[in-house]
Image (cartoon, grey):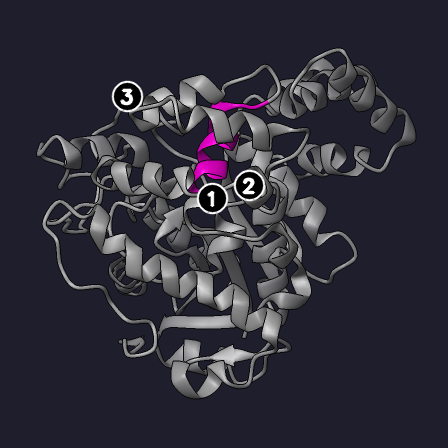
């Protein structure tokens, strides 16, 4: 049985994702494992709907197993996001890692991934960062010098950037990287085809109460919106000291002082983001820092040895896949939680907290889903 893993957010699951899963099953693998972000996602936001809803739709549309990418990794940099997903893919004995990309030339993507080990490339990045460039821009400039402008242009697309990080994380493993061409709308684009739209555009349509049915068969009748927890986030940040911020993931270079002051002088999240922006800190990174602070994610927990395989849902094929895993398996949460190490428990506790806080972001408030009591989805 050939197993393909997909590191995903499915925020929400749409026809582009359906195309990816269908292509994998038609051309590459017998079954698909979705390693999916939980209730908070990499752009530093809440998911549009909870992880159980998204897992169910993924299973209904061709995935055989859905496991959760721990929140601390899901809310981290592209490098750590990829690292967490790849380690779980390894633990589930995946034969391949498939990913949608604007450029499906795996050879070129691999050439970019390999250049990160080149000393000249590393020196160029340090040089550009020292001159004031933020990390992603420094990487792009270094790639253009060491490889070519064509390679650098590939990195201008967000899914290509993630693809490179996946390939870097796979280095030395037996898992094959397979890039599959994205169809239709680009990432974050508001331009649509008849049936394909970006997840960003679908979320906007949902939040504006507009029709989105032709882009996904997922019903989102109670969406989550970050503005609904804006006051709670600002309150949490204002109770934190500079030392508290220093322990938070993604914070460095004295930024703890900047966020300590900014959260006291901002009356909205948008104003906070604006007050925190610097040349080196992109908006996406700032949003992640704010969410990491809100959830109290200690940066020391983001290590591959702290990972586990948390099953959200599966079918019969998925049940076969989990029979052999090299990481602790969490299915019956109360029972399996006790088998985790202290650091693994601490990482899992963040997922629990995320599940408890997520319902506050919903337009219509509901009780939280207790991770210790919610049953996995079986179809």
- Is 303 displayed left or right of 115 in the figure? left
Label pair 3/2, CB-CB below 8 angstroms = no
Check the image and report above or below for 128 versus 199.
Answer: above
Task: Answer few, some or many: residues within 10 Å of disc 1's Cα (few below 14, many 20 plus, some between 14 and 19).
Answer: many
The quadrant in which residue 104 appears is top right
Give the residue displayed 42% in from the left and 73% down from the top. Answer: 311
Q: Main secondary structure of the magenta part?
A: helix
Let me know if residue 176 appears in the view: yes
Percent position (x, y) of residue 323? 53, 85
Find the distance from the CA under tag 3 to the CA under tag 2.
39 Å
Q: Say left or right for 62 vs 260.
A: left
Quadrant including the N terminus:
bottom right
The circle drawn on residue 191 is 3
Q: Are marks 1 and 2 in contact (CB under 8 Å)?
A: yes
Instruction: Please provide percent x and percent y for residue 337.
Output: 48, 81
- The stretch of residues the image draws in magenta is 281-292
Residue 254 spot, x, y in % from top left: 65, 29
Using the rendered view, name the quadrant where residue 246 is placed: top right
Secondary structure, mark 2, is: helix
Label 1 to label 2: alpha-carbon separation: 7 Å
Is 286 one of the magenta-colored residues? yes
Residue holding disc 1: 293
Residue found farthest to the top? 131
Look at discs 1 and 2 and give the one toward the viewer.
2
Q: Mark 2 sits on what residue?
A: 245
Classify the position of the C terminus by image quarter.
bottom left
Q: Residue 37 versus residue 292: which sits nearer the camera?
A: 292
Residue 314 is covered by the magenta coloring: no
């Amino acid at each position: 049985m050939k197993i393909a893993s997909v590191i995903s957010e499915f925020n929400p699951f749409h026809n582009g994702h359906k195309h990816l899963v269908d292509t994998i099953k038609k051309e590459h693998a017998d079954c698909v494992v979705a390693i999916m972000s939980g209730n908070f996602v990499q752009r530093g936001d809440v998911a549009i709907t909870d992880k159980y809803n998204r897992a169910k739709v993924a299973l209904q549309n061709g995935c055989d197993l859905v496991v959760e990418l721990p929140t601390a990794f899901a809310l981290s940099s592209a490098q750590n996001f990829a690292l967490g997903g790849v380690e779980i893919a390894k633990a589930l004995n995946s034969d391949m890692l498939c990913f949608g990309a604007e450029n499906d030339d795996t050879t070129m993507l691999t050439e970019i991934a390999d250049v990160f080990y080149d000393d000249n490339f590393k020196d160029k990045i340090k040089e550009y960062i020292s001159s004031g460039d933020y990390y992603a821009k420094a990487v792009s400039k270094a790639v253009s010098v060491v490889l070519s402008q064509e390679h650098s242009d590939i990195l201008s697309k967000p899914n290509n950037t993630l693809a490179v990080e996946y390939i870097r994380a796979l280095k030395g493993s037996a898992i094959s990287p397979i890039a599959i061409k994205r169809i239709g709308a680009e990432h974050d684009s508001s331009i649509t085809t008849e049936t394909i739209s970006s997840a960003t555009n679908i979320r906007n349509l949902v939040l504006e109460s507009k029709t989105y049915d032709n882009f996904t068969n997922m019903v989102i009748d109670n969406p989550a919106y970050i503005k609904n927890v804006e006051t709670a986030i600002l309150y949490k940040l204002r109770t934190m000291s500079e030392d508290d911020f220093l322990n938070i993931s993604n914070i460095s270079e004295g930024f703890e002082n900047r966020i300590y002051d900014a959260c006291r002088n901002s009356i909205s999240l948008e104003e906070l983001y604006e007050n925190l922006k610097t040349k080196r800190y992109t908006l996406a990174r700032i949003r992640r820092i704010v969410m990491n602070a809100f959830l109290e994610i200690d940066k020391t927990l983001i290590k591959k040895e702290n990972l586990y395989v948390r099953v959200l849902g599966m079918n019969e094929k998925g049940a076969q896949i989990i029979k052999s895993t090299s990481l602790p398996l969490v299915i019956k949460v109360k029972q399996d939680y006790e088998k985790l190490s202290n650091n693994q428990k601490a990482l899992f506790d963040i997922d629990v907290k995320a599940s408890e806080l997520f319902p506050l972001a919903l337009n219509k408030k509901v009780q939280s889903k207790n991770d210790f009591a919610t049953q996995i989805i079986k179809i």
